[in-house]
Image (cartoon, grey):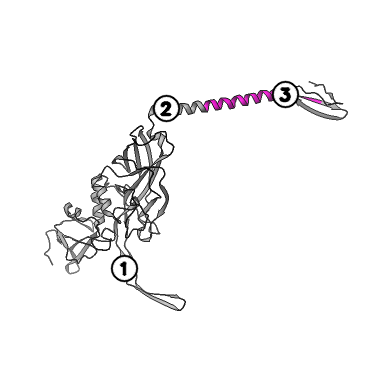
Amino acid sequence: MPSPGENGYYAQSVRWASGFDLSSSQDFEFPTKWTVTRDGDMALVTAETEFPINLLLSFPNRNLDGNSMDLNQGATCCSINTWLKVRKPGGFGVSQISGRFGLSQLWGIWFSKNQALHNPECKPISPDNNGYVKANYDLSYKIIESGLNPVVEISIDEPSKCIFLIHSGPLEQVKRIANSGSGGYLAEHPFWSGEAPTYFNSILNKPDQVIQIGTGDFTGSRYESAFLYRDENILEVASLPKQKLSHFDKVRRVGNKVIITTTIDGSQINPEENGSVSIYTGFYSWYSKKSSFFSGGWTISFSRSTWTARYSSGGWTDSGLFMSYTTDAIKIPIADLFLSVEAKAKRDADAKAAAGITAKQEADAKAAAGITAKSKVTINCVKGSIFKKVTALKPKCPAGYKQQKSTK
């Protein structure tokens, strides 16, 4: 056991191990700076270490452990431990504290710093009673400039202020997703899932390509992922777009809003074409989760004359900060994006003129109908004790009837 430090605690270092097994011989230790503060009867212990970026970059999700799970959020890469000197009846003793952190979370923090979206005022939400993580957000857009290279501003208003990364994977079909519980296109999956080299290359090497844009409506319905992946809230990519559009993106944070400004290359688009352009957007948020435990034991199931016995050793899920992935899309009419201001003004003027002509025609027809109605005259006709009213432009009483004189 190491000797006590000057502040009355034992200092240990952060330890990294590949895969799940923290007892692996492939581990590293990094110097750690510890601080202890006191607030009344409570003591706050913090540890800080510098994780070498070169080491982080050497361990993207390339199936290091053979199970395609090396970036799964349940997999732990880092363990931090220390011993505290505590007062006990009759003297002093020691108490161990430890913490763990995942490689996927380290990557998330690094990506977030590159986009400068980290917000110290983040208040992470918790999963609902069914374990699903659903970000409360509002997605809107406005067209800043229209024409050959239109500029669109997309705003994601998220009250918890926990969005830390904007990125949706390529609009390409998945070749192999070993452990993901959702869809068949890369844009539907978070960076820690499946074909991660594709994600890492696009996030690190193409910082101005954070959303996906194509012609037509290529999205489908929204679905929730499988049981083990309830931190993914995905809008389905139903098919590849008719045409993928090149674009240049910038991302910034304004309070609890994250704003994406994209400039679209419309050189291959006919601005007078009917249809729309879809902008597929993915974003990541932090959420908090408490530890949960499930007991083990035997379960027996029967099927006709056979029975099966299964044993589970039980287990737990880690607590801490985790990442959720949400995707959504907006659809914008092609004419609104790619027609010039003058062309749109002429289009709107022509539409108003056509509407005006139609309105005038309807008004004239109503006026003519009104004049006709007012031109008709009604007279009263009488034959003995029988009375009859006749209405016409030039009304006449039927044979045998006489017109009754009006009295004032």
- Name the spot of residue 229 as percent of width and height, x first: 35, 58
Q: Secondary structure at mark 3?
A: loop
27 or 368, which lies in front?
368
Asked if the residue at tag 1 contacts the one at tag 3, i.e. Cβ–Cβ closer than 8 Å, the answer is no
Of circles 3 and 1, the one toward us is: 3
User: Which residues make up the magenta segment?
Assistant: 355-380
Residue at the spot x=16%, y=52% of the render?
Answer: 54
Crowding at dot 2, Cα within 10 Å, few <14 / some 14-19 / many 20+, comes out as few
In terms of sequence position, does the residue under pointer 2 or pointer 3 come before the other? 2
Q: Which disc, if any, is residue 376?
A: 3
Q: Is residue 158 visible?
A: no
- The image shows a total of numbered marks equal to 3
Q: Secondary structure at mark 1?
A: strand
In terms of sequence position, does the residue under pointer 2 or pointer 1 come before the other? 1
- Mark 2 highlights which residue? 345
Crowding at dot 3, Cα within 10 Å, few <14 / some 14-19 / many 20+, comes out as few
Residue at the spot x=59%, y=25% of the render?
Answer: 363
Q: Residue furthest bottom?
A: 305
Q: Is residue 374 magenta?
A: yes
Hey, what amino acid is under mark 2? Ala
Measure how far apart labels 2 and 1 are at the Cα level: 65 Å
Q: Is residue 183 left or right of residue 366?
A: left
79 or 27, which lies in front?
27
Measure how far apart labels 2 and 3 are at the Cα level: 46 Å
Hey, what amino acid is under mark 3? Lys
In terms of sequence position, does the residue under pointer 3 or pointer 1 come before the other? 1
Crowding at dot 1, Cα within 10 Å, few <14 / some 14-19 / many 20+, comes out as few
Measure how far apart labels 3 and 1 are at the Cα level: 92 Å
Q: Which disc, if any, is residue 315?
A: 1
Quadrant containing the C terminus in the rendered view: top right
- Name the spot of residue 278 as percent of width and height, x first: 39, 42
Quadrant containing the N terminus in the rendered view: bottom left
